[in-house]
Image (cartoon, coloured by chain):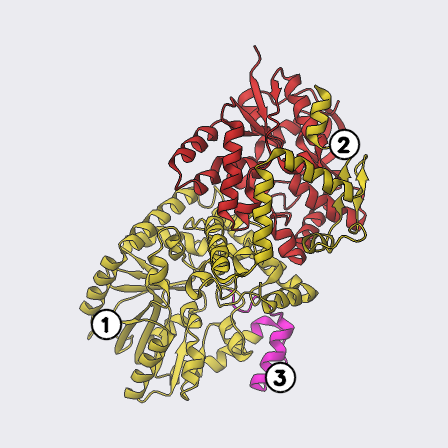
Chain colours: A red, B yellow
Amino acid sequence: MPARVSLFVTCIVDQLFPKVGLAVVDVLERLGFQVDFPEQQTCCGQPAFNSGYREEARQVARHFLDVFHDADYIVVPSGSCTSMIAHHFEDIFDKEPENLERARRLESKVYEFSRFLLEVAGVDDVGARLDEVVTYHDSCHALRELKVKDGPRRLLGKVRGLELREMDAAEECCGFGGTFSVKFAEVSGGMARTKIDSIVRTGASAVVSVDSSCLMQIQGAISRVGLPIRTLHLAEVLASR
Amino acid sequence: MSAIFDEKIHQTLADSKLQLAIFAATGRLMEKRRKAVNADACPDYQELRTQAHEVKRHTIDHLDYYLELFERNVSAHGGRVVYCKDGTEVADFVLGLARQRRASLIVKSKSMTTEEVDLNERLEHHQLESVETDLGEYLIQLAHERPYHIVAPALHKTKEQVADLLTERLGVPRETVIEKQTMIARAVLREKFLAADIGISGANFLVADSGAIVLVENEGNARLTTSAPKVHIAIAGIEKMIPRAQDLAVFLRLLGRSATGQPLTVYTSFLSGPRRGDEIDGPDEFYVVLLDNGRTKVLADREKRESLYCIRCGACLNHCPVYRKIGGHSFPWVYSGPIGAILTPQFLGVNHEPGLPFASSLCGACAEVCPVKIDIPKILLDLRSDVKKSEEREGASRLERFAFRAWAWVMRHPRLYEMAGMAAASLAPSRDGGGWVRSAPSGIKVAPLDAWLSQRDLPSAPAKSFRQLWRERR
């Protein structure tokens, strides 16, 4: 009996980047996992939490707890949403002991995608092939809140045909920041352009990350200036054959 | 966000020379710090951070005890502690003392605490000349500006701008070589040191068990400020306290490394009390002014009181991608960067600039480099919630609040969520390969969408959402 994995695909992947979700399913099934997609899922509540609307965030987070309460493993193709569930649910349920207990039970079950592959599936070579020079963008929440740093690089290192070229400011924010990207659009855009300069200097033709929101920001800014660089979620790279 | 905050940000971003100056200067400071804290240069760096955090936590949690201990020990050395509630009380104390001692000239070494209470302006208002003696601060004073950065006040000024400034204010021939500019300032300041009646310094640390203040600097001006004039007044926030002299073994190693990448600054001065009978140098009178100015309010807030652990190294500014774009003068108060974004709303109230806690992508670089491990992103999130609560009480931001309430409702009803997604997708141009759109569909006018599109393209809607594809797959 293969282990059962519940996919929390995230609202942004569900609505805007469904191919990323399919790639996650593809990689997990190849490794022998039985993937379940609880269809009642929506969002983790982070947009409201980061915007100062704690009560609204709590309502959405309660819904998340209801949907995923019996999951064995929850795999999330996003460092940011994983961190919301694993770290910030504790902050928003500090006055609801029952939900706090439920949130804590989920903490040990929720995994950012690359972490799940390395720590639970125990693989770094998923048999992928991609003939391309890529660079890796450390998304802030994966890097600083989940300490995801070497894992994605290890996985990329095993992809046949792929060359990973580090950029000089891999750890610097792309400027997305959720509602920050529209509340302080000019600053956010400036940060994206600084990031792109760093990407261009590597000569890579693709940027890889574990968060689709960062990639939306980077790709949006790349597309605006018309550079021949594409963005790929790590799952898309690992699903390539 | 207020219009003035928005405008200052816009002006800074539009000034390409200024952008380059900020980016280059902060980049150099980042690089220096990186080399000073790496495993070879400082193997126990992470342990030092943890220890510094714990010492600060203990001190701030027991601040009343350490303030009394400090005061007793300062008195035992012949000095005097003066408690001030705000800037007015600080100015009144200094002015009163200046009148009694018939003082007319004050020299100052760098102090953010005195900037916080506009001390120079208050003294000048009473015809007391107060001269900044740190080179950067001196330039800023000549330019009638506020410090651009906690550690490097004139970080935004190029040597050409400094040349113009010196010529204009001092009437000296234009000089663009930095070393020669320094000599010009030095010639002016030496005379001020010799003539000054009172020296005012800040304090990097207040050491409770010794009744001493500690000053770190690179120029030697703080030593002259505190030893040449007959009266020395140190002005510091109450949170600068540490329990024991031996704790400096932790803090001094972190401060120089985090601020400028130095293992130690060039000068570290330990000052306790006035000159003793058998000593040659030192002032006749020694005062320590301990300032509240909002700190006890922060102290009362258990969730956010760790904001008071800050040792003013400026590392969070240098590493902040937002500070590196918007610079120091966009911020509404003297403290800029991430630490300014958490101190300002707590000291001056969240309504002083309600946009401030939101001016962050929450990337966490600040917390990563903070030598005392202040969880700045968490405090920013708490402050955002405080802003929204305050807005709700005052009936502000109604549209946004309504939008988030509606959003939360939709997110609790998966069918509604799916229908809303499909409705939005039907309005947007669809995409099968991965098209990106440059403008909003005609007739659609939504402020956040326009803001996004002002800077970047937007992904067009895929033909089907993931959940639709999932169902088809089964």
Q: Is residue B353 above or below residue B377?
A: below
Q: Is residue B70 left or right of residue B151?
A: left
Q: Is residue A102 above or below residue B54?
A: above
- The foreground one among B366 and B214 is B366
Separation of disc 3 and disc 1 at Cα?
Answer: 44 Å
Percent of width and height locating residue B440: 77, 51
Disc 2: CA contacts within 10 A as few (<14), some (14-19) or many (>=20): some
**Camera sees residue B261:** no
Tell us which disc is closer to us: 3 or 1. 1
- Residue ID for mark 1: B79
- The foreground one among B329 and A166 is B329
Separation of disc 2 and disc 1 at Cα?
Answer: 70 Å
* Quadrant of image for the C terminus of chain A: top right
Percent of width and height locating residue A156: 66, 29
Separation of disc 2 and disc 3 at Cα?
Answer: 59 Å
- The foreground one among B192 and A134 is A134
Q: Earlier in the sequence, mark 3 or mark 1?
A: 1
Identified at 73% across, 51% down, the residue is B456
Q: Subunit of mark 1?
A: B
Q: Subunit of mark 2?
A: A
Residue B277 image-quadrant placement: bottom left
Magenta-colored stretch includes residue B159: yes
- Residue ID for mark 3: B173
Look at the numbered disc 1 and give the secondary structure of its residue.
Answer: loop
Q: Which residues are magenta?
A: B151-180
Specify the label residue A132 is tagged with.
2
